[in-house]
Image (cartoon, coloured by chain):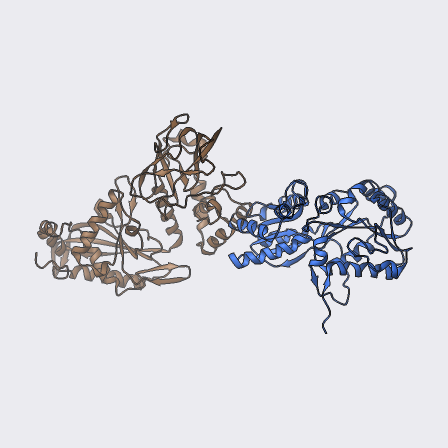
Chain colours: A brown, B blue
Amino acid sequence: MKKRVPILMPQMGQSVAEGTIVAWKKKVGDAVQTDDVLMEIETDKTNVEVECAATGQLVTCLKRDGETAAAGEIIGYIEVEGADEPAEKPHAAVPTGDAVTVSSNTQFRIQHELPEINRDRYSPFVMRLAMLNGVTLGELQGIRGTGRDRRVTKSDLLQYLARRPVGASSVQAELHNGVPAAEDLSALGKVVPMTSIRRTIADHMVQSIHTSAHVTMVHLVDVSHLVGLRNRIKDEFEQRFKAKLTYTGLMTFVTSRVLRDYPTINASVAGASLILRKDINIGCAVALPDESLVVPVVQHADQKTFPEISQDLDRLIACARARELTRADVESGTFTISNFGAFGSIIGTPIINQPQVAILGMGAVVKQAVVIDDQIVIRDRLYLSFSFDHRVIDGAMGGRFLNAIQKATEKLDEKMLNLETL
Amino acid sequence: MPPAETTFLEAIRQALQRLLREHADVVMFGQDIGAFGGAFKVTAGLQKEFGADRVFDTPISESAILGAALGMATMGLRPVVEMQFSDFATTALHQLLNNAGTLHYRTGVAAPLVVRAPCGGGFAGGPFHSEDLEAFFCHMPGIKVVYPSFPADARALLMASALDPNPVVFLENKYLYRHVKEWLPTAWAPSALGAARVCRPGSDAVVLTYGAMVHEAIRAAELVHAEDGGEVMVLDLRTLKPLDTDSILAAVAATNRVLIVHEGWHTGGFGAEIAALVAERAFHLLDAPIWRLTAPDCPVPFSPELEKAYRPNAEKIRDALLELLEH
């Protein structure tokens, strides 16, 4: 007797909610064996090959290459000779490699023969509540569901509505209404589905814009002494500390020290409360070769010396590019620095990394003619673009903080950086 | 000394006694209800008090009992007859469906009669003494169906049934006869047919039920609360026809999750009617599928263990509720 065994999207790590199928390695109709590589999948953390958990024939693929499925969702079926196989329970596909841990909790209950229930189905009540409140499908899809198969329940939606920033609906609606109907898309050009990391970034960015009242201030900072210092000692620094001497590292060092005096800027928002974070953990935005972005975090930056910060940054950037960042590497940031100057921009308006309340953007270091003591001199200068959440930080506070950053940067010397021996 | 608690059975007896006392047109008859006092002693002492002209025995013919009752009703009496077990009423369905139910529609003549029908299982009575046939009775036009779960309601609703101008099937769940007691108010509140009652408030889900299952549902809701913190409402429908649709819809609006429980069979059970009502009128209020917990589609088993597996109870309701709350 033949039985159909569902193939489930595996759960890879506790924080990973979904995966994207990069490519099926077997076609419908292919004979498959236990441990055959069935597909390659991608999550926002890593890429893995997924092995087949049963021997038989691949009969159905419910998701195509490039499509995304929630962890635990059925993505296909294998038909097995059923008499001796314990095929009643669906098999979670088994990811290979040791970079990920497979939760033993992939057991998946199928009630009333309705395995297709998934989180993109909404109850009539949720749909009505969403309609009455102008909640778009895009917003619904962004809500974390607590029902079966992570379905969004009434209480999930009510909690979302309680937290939802005013005005979220109209912008979301525009975003989603602007998309032409599916059948027209390929006529417009090549259709490239967003990867799961891209969608995560998109969600975070839009959520941040809808959450915070962004204000950006810009200061012009004289970094001639740092340029001189860097040019002088960077090679020796690299030899001694096995790390690059970078402007990002320097600003991470300065910012971590100044933040000690500005607890409301080293903070996060939780509901109607501001949490003044006890640690100072600075995230640094890193662009990846595939045009995506991650923000690994230098933990306890204020307690680390400049060489230690530089070593941390080197390690984090290397891990980010190799997609080997751990959960600990990307969590618990309290403030973020983005160095868009690396690409030549001089001024930017960075978006706050929620639930933080501020972000510092670094422009390119440029040579400028400056009047000092009635003399025109050539100085290396850097624009610092500081975006903050005006819900919790006012202009005076933001200005004082940025001014303190400027002063500290301009005062920075080898002794402070533990570099006097170089 | 505080007044004693009254059993479900005694509450019905009190209503019958009062009907006989206060309404000269009320007569009662059925198998062994006279000198013997009925199979369950519901009518004990009534023949002695009111005489064999008003409380008397009949041959073993449910069809004859109902036919006679209908004849008396058309001639100005208010018969309150007993089917010894509701299971046996099936032999009288023709009288009920085609004669009693249609009479007023055909002739304009009212048929004020009550058919008391002890029903339900839970005591190893086997297939002919345990059935729960409310769905049969509710399917018939022109018949009202009452199914109380508490002594005070039974007493008040039996009075209301006897004074109603329509044929009424009054279902008495035998399990409740001696298992359920409560203080009865000395004043008899007037009670109208067609009003449900919230027995237990709650906001997370509602159990729509009636009869013996009300008590199981209340216990299940308490188990759920203790284990899960969930607040489950229990709505006792009390009258199945006319059905208190407003209270049902209000309960769905308050909870958005619905479990229907009854002791009768699944297919074509009364729960299907309630589910259809909720789907038709309250679809937009549902946050989870409507679930039914009923007896399976098989005859009531005689073996006590099998009957335990057959009949819904508090533990099964609890399991269903926990799953529904998780949905």
Residue A262: percent from left, percent from top: 28, 64
**Side (left or right) of A302 relative to A102:** left
* Nearer to the camera, A165 or A420: A420
* Nearer to the camera, B56 or A24: B56
Quarter of the figure that contains the N terminus of chain B: bottom right
Residue B96: percent from left, percent from top: 81, 43
* Nearer to the camera, A403 or A13: A13
Specify whether residue A228 is in view: yes
Identify the residue at horizontal 60%, vertical 57% (top origin). Answer: B219
* Nearer to the camera, B286 or B319: B319
**Side (left or right) of B233 relative to A416:** right
Specify whether residue A387 is in view: no
Residue A275: percent from left, percent from top: 35, 62
**Side (left or right) of A318 relative to A208:** left
- Number of marks present in the image shown: 0
Residue A361: percent from left, percent from top: 26, 52
A73 above or below B157?
above
Q: Residue furthest bottom?
A: B1
